[in-house]
Each structure stands twice: as structure tokens, then as C-alpha cells.
Amino acid sequence: MRKVAVVGIGMTKFGVAEKTAMELFAEAATDAIDDAGITTKDIEALFFSNVLGFFSEGMGNPAPFAAAELGLQDIPSTRFEGACATGSVAIRDAYMWVASGFYDVVLVAGTERVCNMGTPFATRTFAMGHDSYYEQFTGLTFPGVFAMIAHLYSKKYGIPLQKLKEQMALVAVKNHANALLNPKAHFHKKITVEDVLNSVMICDPLQLYDCCPFSDGAAAIILASEEKAKKMTDTPIYIAGAGQSSAGPLFRQKDITITQARITSSKMAYKQAKVEPKDIDIVELHNCFTIAEIVATEALGFFNFGEGGKAVEEGLTQIGGKIPVNPSGGLKAKGHPIGATGIAQAVEIVEQLRGEAGKRQVDAEIGMTDTLGGDLATICNIIYRR
Amino acid sequence: MRKVAVVGIGMTKFGVAEKTAMELFAEAATDAIDDAGITTKDIEALFFSNVLGFFSEGMGNPAPFAAAELGLQDIPSTRFEGACATGSVAIRDAYMWVASGFYDVVLVAGTERVCNMGTPFATRTFAMGHDSYYEQFTGLTFPGVFAMIAHLYSKKYGIPLQKLKEQMALVAVKNHANALLNPKAHFHKKITVEDVLNSVMICDPLQLYDCCPFSDGAAAIILASEEKAKKMTDTPIYIAGAGQSSAGPLFRQKDITITQARITSSKMAYKQAKVEPKDIDIVELHNCFTIAEIVATEALGFFNFGEGGKAVEEGLTQIGGKIPVNPSGGLKAKGHPIGATGIAQAVEIVEQLRGEAGKRQVDAEIGMTDTLGGDLATICNIIYRR
């Protein structure tokens, strides 16, 4: 298996866009192609990430149309769908095609337009990520899942709910502060713990500022074999390890505060990269809700179980802390255009490892992404290094 | 790159099922696992094909739930969506993961429940395979596309429409005759040219019997590395070559009677397999409409352009003919459960190459599949050999 590097990155501003998902895709993809210093002719295949296109665009099988949007008729183009984890699943798959020697240069891109659906319809549609035979009829939505996790976490570790809510609020405050340093973030708004605790209740104990937004946006990266990468750039960022795992519906999961699939997936990535959690200098992880960030830092091995909230209080996850978590602002404040999210995480890690992250720059050699899809059902982790 | 073989196959009866897509999947997958003589513990990853699950099952991100249905929590599971070509795209992707040495044994499965949607809603939903920005508003559906192809074909090659309709009718008659020999086919009904020409008009010149049905069903195969395969079975069927290509929306395609993406894709597969069209002993190809079978046999190189209809008249595509086309009955008569179709094609070719196809057995060493997705937009070809 050959070494594979990211040689180009592109990303639209996240937020409410007056563009179609295809237009957003084309913007991010052409930026990545420019950044790599290549032309579309160099691209051998497209790995395409999109989740709700059937609903927001009325379009199935979007991958070949995306390729054609760049003038790339007649190349293989494949669409992946793994709920919020889709982008990272597409990267991992593309990585294998280059590592195996089959392709030298490929484009991985994710796009999503969802704001045009409106939050109620988007939330209802998105709840199809839950098992339709056993769970959906209960009225479960994703805020409900993470609210349950917060309650269970509070009980399991004996952390009073009000105390946990303050820790969760600090997660939101930190991510909004980071997003202020990120020109492409959905939110540019400084918030306080009081703002979070006074915001409207969404699903007890989650309040408005505990929740990430639906965003429109796209992100793209170019992957190349080591040999090609060295000719293209002085700062290739290598994929050192990749993991993926899955779980059944919630009712089949033993302990939803743990996310077993994340433990399996991250161990797979750590093993391949020959590193341990302590070696990771920076992580972009799946903070769709504030409690999601806390439990993810534990399952990934950065903090002991039950101590993720304390770590936030101690500032360990801030830029400059022990392990900067979501310097981009994460899903919570950078935004969450579903199919683009995993790829946007990669874009942030690559910018950071290149030393091009501007005001939010972290001193980092090894970075990691963590993306969760659906019912805690799909997890994908990728480790990057300079 | 290592050699990869199919070591297990499974398939439900196609038709109108009183089962969910997940139940159909489980039936086909367990049959494939039994056929391979392995247990679920041997399966390292699931490559999952499903197209309309959002609508017919109300379920997004179905891959991890499918894995869990077999008790396979904690393995990577990835969903592909490329309209009707999805199953073959999933096989090609899984092939690379095994060929590269990353996995030794994987499950590729496709499932679809669509009859519960009813034909009008299914047709409308499925029309999202057309470009939503430039084509759908015209009212275009898939019968419309293939009706246009028939008209263009008639004009381009100077074949009077009535003559072409008779050739198309012979395609339907042949596929229904083949399906009578296939216990798992959707239709078990002998038809005549007159039956076709007297059937209800769907979209001129396509009549009812020119069209494939929507079917429920599932199919699954187990792929293994050569080393593992030889320990599992005396009749491993190897993947000798795989190709995939794409095209933009119809309005960006030069000549929709040709399907350029099919020419590119099949050439990729022929080149890798080091064979030519004349070396193919048997083909399962994408005959969603009778005219689709005629144009596919030409683009794949079996007959000259404009002579596919004549070949049918001469019996060259029958079992026992020069190149038996769709001995299973194909989409037209075996049925078309969208996400399962590409994998069911593989199941048929493997049965044939093993010599296990019973009354529809063809003398064959090298077989090929051809699957088309959406707006003639995704094509995938795979070549198998004993």
C-alpha cells in the first residue's frame, strides 16, 4: 500500500447560501483543484458525499452530474451516504483507491444544501437516520438522542445535571470563540455561558446554543499518491491511518454514552498510524451538540470516561490547551452542511498542519478527524500528519 | 493487487414481497454466507447497495443497520447510491478493498423494497435520477428517456419504427422465455410478439411489455482474496476486470443511442481482464426497457452499431446463441429491485460460470455484467472468469 497525501483543499463559506448544492460543490472543488496546482484533466475519479439531495435538490445519483459540472464527463464518480459521517467515509474510500495504486489523483468532495428545507422539515427528514422499524415511531429526533446521552452521562458519572449543563455551555462558548477566528464559519458571534443557559429549551437538557445549526456548504480535497504529491507541493499532508466502524440502532447499543463504534474506529486509525491518543496534537470531532463533544473526547482516548466535562472547564480543549478540539469552531459554530462536514474537518486539519490556519493556528504535527453518522451508527476517524 | 473471487452467492425471489428491505437483505446475505461456508464472524466489512430506502423504508444511513441485522455490529459498513447501477458500483468498490490487501473477506449486498410505493409514486420518485435543475421540470421520466432513444435509433439507422418495435418485442419474448427457466424471476409468463405489440402504450413507442417492472428483492455475494477463496471453494469465480464511468445530464450527452460512458467503462473492464468483446461467453446487461438491451449490446462491442436489433431477430442473443444476453431474464423479466440489480447480475454470472444454472445453463468461461444508473449517467461493467 502506497502513502497517500492531501495536496489540495477547498471550502465554501458555511451558512445560508443562495446557491444550489451543485454550485456549492463546484466552488469548493475548483478551489481545491487550484490549491493543488492541477487541472481537472488530472482527476481520475470523483468520490462524492451528499446526504439529503433527494429532498433538498430533488436529485438522486448526483455524483455523475457533479463530475459533469466540472467538465469531467467519462470518469468514475461514486456517491456515498452515511448520514453525517458521509464525507469521512468518502475520504477513507478514496484513500484506499489511491493507496492500492489504482489511481494517482482523485477528488473527494461533499456538498449539502439544507437551509432551503427549513429546520422542521430538515429535522424530520434527518430523523430517518434512526431505525424506521423500531425507533422512529417514538418521535425520536437527533436532539432527543443527545439529550438522552446527557441525562445518562449525568447519572452514570454522578455529575449533577446543572453542573453538566455548565460544562456543556463552556463547550459552546469555546467553539463560538474559535469560529470567530474562522472566516468561513457559519456563526461569527461571541457568546457567554449565561447566553447558553438562557437560550430557548430545545430538548431538555439541550438548549438552543447546545445545538449545531443546519448549514449550506461544500468542501473538497485532492488526494494524490506520495510520488505525485511530492511533485505538486512542498507541504503534502499524509493520511497516516483511517478507521471506520458501525453500530445497530440505539436499542441494540449497550451504553450510548460510550459509542462503542467510535472506540473500534479510532483504535483502527491509531493502530495504522502507529500513534496513541497522546500523540494527537489537534482534533476536529463531531460536536453536533455540546454533549457530543464531551463524550467524543473520552471515547477517542483524550480524557478518562466521565472527565470530558472537567477537561473543558480546565481549558484543556482550547486552542493552546493540551489537545485543541475543534479549532475551526466545529459543527457547533463553523456549521454542519451534512455531506460536507467530514471533508471540512479534513480541510481544517490540513490547513493547521500546513501552518496556514491564521489566527486559530495550533502548533501541530499530527491531527485527527472524527465524524459520526446517524444513530451513533457510523463512525469514521482519519489521522493526518505532516 | 491481489486476485479476488466470488465465493458465495445469495438471492431472494424477486417480485412483490411482504417483507421489509432489511428482511430481504438478511435472507440474501445469510444465503450467501451459507453458500460460502463461512460464518458472519469471517466478514470484515459490508458494502451495501440501496437506492430508494429514504422513501420506501423511511430510512437513511441503512448500512450499519443492515450489518447489525446480521449481528455484525462494529464492522465498517458503507452505503452506495448510484441509481440502478448502485449494486455494481458497490461490488467494484469492495473488489478494490480486497484486491489492495486491506480485507480478505467482505459482504456485498443490495436490497430494495419499492412495490409498497406503488408504480406512480415510484416512477415519480425515481425520476429524481434526472437532473433536477435542467430536466425534471420537463416532466421527463425513465420510460420517456428510452422512448426518445428508440425514436432516435430508428431515425439514425433508418430502421422503420414498426420494424424496430418488432425487434424490441423479440427482446421481451426472449427475456420472458429465459425467466421461465429461472425460479427466482419476478415474471413466469410466456409471451408472444403479438402480446407485446398489443399491450398498453406506456410512452410511445414503448408498450407495457417493453418495460421492466419495479420489483422487491435482494442479492448478496461474498468476495475473498485468492488465497482465502481457494480454501473455501473448488469453484472460485474471479473478478478479471472492472470498469466504471459517468456522464452528465442527457442534455450534455452527444448521442444518447450510444451511451459514451458505457464504451469507456467496458473498455476499462476489457483492458484489465485482457479480453475483447468476442471473448465474452455470457452477459447480464441493463435491459430496463427492450430498446436498452439492443443499444447495450452494441456499445459493449458485441454487435455493430445499428445491428443490435437484427442480432435479436437472428437469435444470436438467446441461450445457445452467439452471445447469450440475460439468460436470467434480466431486469425485463427477472425483475428490477433497484439496489439489488447489479448484485443479482453477478449472482447469475457466478451460477453460470460454476455450471449451476440448471435449465438455463450456458457453456461459459468468461461472463460480464453491465449496469446503468440514472440519466445514462453511471455505468459499471465487471468481467468474471472461472
Image (cartoon, coloured by chain):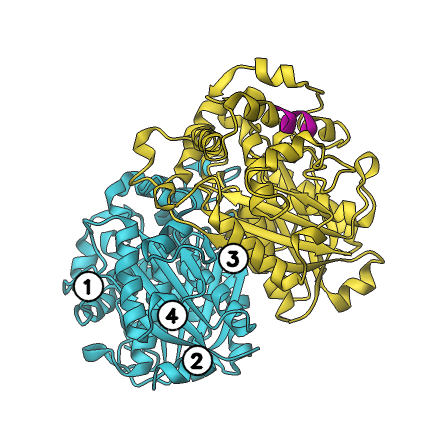
Chain colours: A cyan, B yellow
- Determine whether B364 is above or below B324 in the image: below
Residue drawn at x 58%, y 50% as measured from the top left:
B88
Q: In the image, what residue type sits under mark 1?
A: Val
In the drawing, does residue B185 fall left or right of residue A179?
A: right
Q: Which residue is mark 1?
A: A193
Taking depth in this image into account, of A307 and B174 the one nearest to the observer is B174
- Determine whether B173 is above or below A90 in the image: above
Other-residue count near label 1 (Cα within 10 Å), few / some / many at <14 / 14–19 / ≥20: some
Q: In the image, what residue type sits under mark 4?
A: Ile
Residue B70 circle label: none
Q: Which is nearer the N-term, disc 1 or disc 4?
A: 1
Residue range in magenta is B169-175
Q: In the image, what residue type sits under mark 3?
A: Asp
Q: Which is nearer the N-term, disc 4 or disc 3?
A: 4
Q: Which residue is mark 3?
A: A255
Q: Which is nearer the N-term, disc 2 or disc 1?
A: 1
Element type where label 3 sits in the image: loop
Q: Position of residue A283 (x, y in %)?
A: 37, 74
Contact, CB < 8 Å: mark 2 with mark 3?
no
Split into 4 quadrants, where in the image is the C terminus of chain B?
bottom right
Task: Chain letter for mark 4, please.
Answer: A
Task: Chain letter for mark 2, please.
Answer: A
Taking depth in this image into account, of B123 and B159 the one nearest to the observer is B159
Contact, CB < 8 Å: mark 4 with mark 3?
no
Q: Which is nearer the N-term, disc 2 or disc 4?
A: 4
Residue A386 visible to an observer of this rendering = no
Residue A222 circle label: 4
Element type where label 4 sits in the image: strand
Q: Position of residue A135 (x, y in %)?
A: 48, 40
Residue A228 circle label: 2
